[in-house]
Image (cartoon, helix red, strand yellow):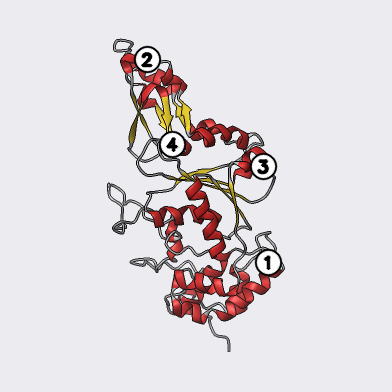
């Protein structure tokens, strides 16, 4: 006698907190998603709202993208190098393997010194210093002039079409410095480091479109990289009063010119060992999570010896373990601790 197999709906196991997606096509509305890892939480804005959904911590200048600024841990030798750069007003040239915290260092400095949001310039092969200093929307201005007519054509509106980039905003005069992250400079054009030399030495640059205007329209207010913020630019020149804290990261894909390196303080971030990895887990997920993660840390260190792994991969594995994953330990490691070369 044959029996009819149960329907897909009847065969579905009961819901649990871990299994969100079942792969059976059955709708399961949820009132909310489970809590995200601390490093994947975003202080965004609700649609139609002018206020952020997350309340800022009083006195908190920059908690770091997704919380990494508050939980950043490096060794005492690296801390000394950072302080040397702060005292000398020299850029930090930070190198190290992927996942050692090069970019997070800028956010940690901004958070601890309460210096506001980090100004971020992610460099790629098409990046130019000009766009990082400012952009002038000449086409937009011409179109607006065509619509409104030439009557009131006295250049008073030109600031509306100029926006400072992250480097330009970092050089705006202020009583306290801004933190500027120039991320993966070695991915840029080979001449880009040399283009930065003058700006890093003089802390100033000219906005050509403003420097040639008559005195009648001076100074001009322009937009900055900060949302809805304007700044006055006299005679078309931006000149800092406090040199920004500049963190330049590199993955070591190529060497920089000696003249550029001379103007920077080099900082190499080593891969953290077992004790520091435990401290990192505790800083992000608590002491209980760190106590229970010994086997994962051991597996992480063993796998890192044969190929590149990033510290945030370890944090992902510990977070899933704490969240009640149904993956057995070996599957968990295969899913999360994959080599950065793409080979599992």
Where in the figure is residue 302, as x and y percent of width and height?
A: 67, 74
The one of 143 and 233 positioned closer to us in this rendering? 233
Q: Which residue is mark 3?
A: 256
> Does residue 185 lie above or below 298 as drawn?
above
Q: Is residue 4 among what the camera can see?
A: yes
Give the alpha-carbon distance from disc 3 to disc 1, as whole Å: 33 Å
Q: Which residue is mark 1?
A: 344
Q: Which residue is mark 4?
A: 171
The 10 Å Cα crowd at callout 3, few under 14, some 14 to 19, many 20 or more, is some
Circle 1 SS class: loop
> Does residue 190 lie above or below 333 as drawn?
above
The 10 Å Cα crowd at callout 1, few under 14, some 14 to 19, many 20 or more, is few
For the residues carrying marks 3 and 1, which lies nearer the camera in this image? Answer: 3
Give the alpha-carbon distance from disc 2 to disc 4, as whole Å: 34 Å
Q: From the viewer's perspective, is 198 left or right of 152?
A: right
Q: Quadrant of residue 310?
A: bottom right
């Amino acid at each position: 006698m044959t029996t009819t197999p149960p329907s897909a709906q009847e065969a579905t196991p009961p819901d649990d907190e871990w299994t969100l997606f079942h792969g059976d096509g059955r709708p399961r509305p949820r009132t909310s998603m489970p809590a995200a890892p601390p490093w994947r939480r975003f202080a965004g804005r609700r649609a139609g709202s002018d206020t952020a959904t997350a309340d800022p911590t009083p006195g908190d200048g920059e908690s770091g993208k997704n919380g990494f600024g508050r939980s950043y841990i490096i060794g005492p030798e690296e801390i000394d190098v950072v302080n040397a750069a702060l005292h000398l007003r020299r850029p930090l040239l930070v190198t190290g393997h992927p996942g050692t915290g090069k970019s997070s260092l800028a956010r940690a400095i901004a958070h601890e010194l309460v210096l506001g949001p980090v100004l971020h310039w992610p460099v790629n092969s098409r990046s130019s210093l000009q766009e990082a200093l400012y952009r002038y929307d000449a086409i937009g201005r011409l179109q607006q002039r065509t619509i409104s007519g030439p009557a009131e054509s006295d250049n008073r509106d030109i600031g509306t079409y100029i926006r400072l980039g992250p480097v330009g905003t970092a050089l705006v005069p202020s009583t306290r410095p801004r933190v500027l992250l120039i991320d993966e400079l070695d991915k840029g054009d080979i001449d880009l480091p040399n283009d930065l030399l003058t700006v890093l030495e003089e802390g100033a640059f000219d906005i050509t479109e403003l420097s040639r205007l008559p005195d009648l329209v001076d100074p001009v207010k322009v937009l900055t990289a900060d949302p809805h913020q304007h700044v006055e630019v006299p005679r078309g020149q931006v000149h800092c009063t406090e040199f920004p804290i500049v963190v330049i990261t590199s993955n070591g894909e190529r060497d920089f010119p000696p003249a550029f390196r001379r103007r920077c303080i080099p900082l190499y971030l080593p891969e953290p060992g077992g004790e520091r990895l435990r401290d990192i887990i505790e800083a992000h997920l608590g002491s209980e999570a760190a106590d229970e993660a010994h086997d994962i840390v051991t597996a992480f260190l063993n796998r890192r010896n044969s190929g590149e792994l990033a510290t945030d991969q370890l944090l992902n594995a510990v977070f899933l373990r704490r969240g009640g994953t149904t993956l057995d330990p070996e599957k968990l490691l295969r899913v999360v601790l994959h080599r950065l070369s793409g080979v599992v």
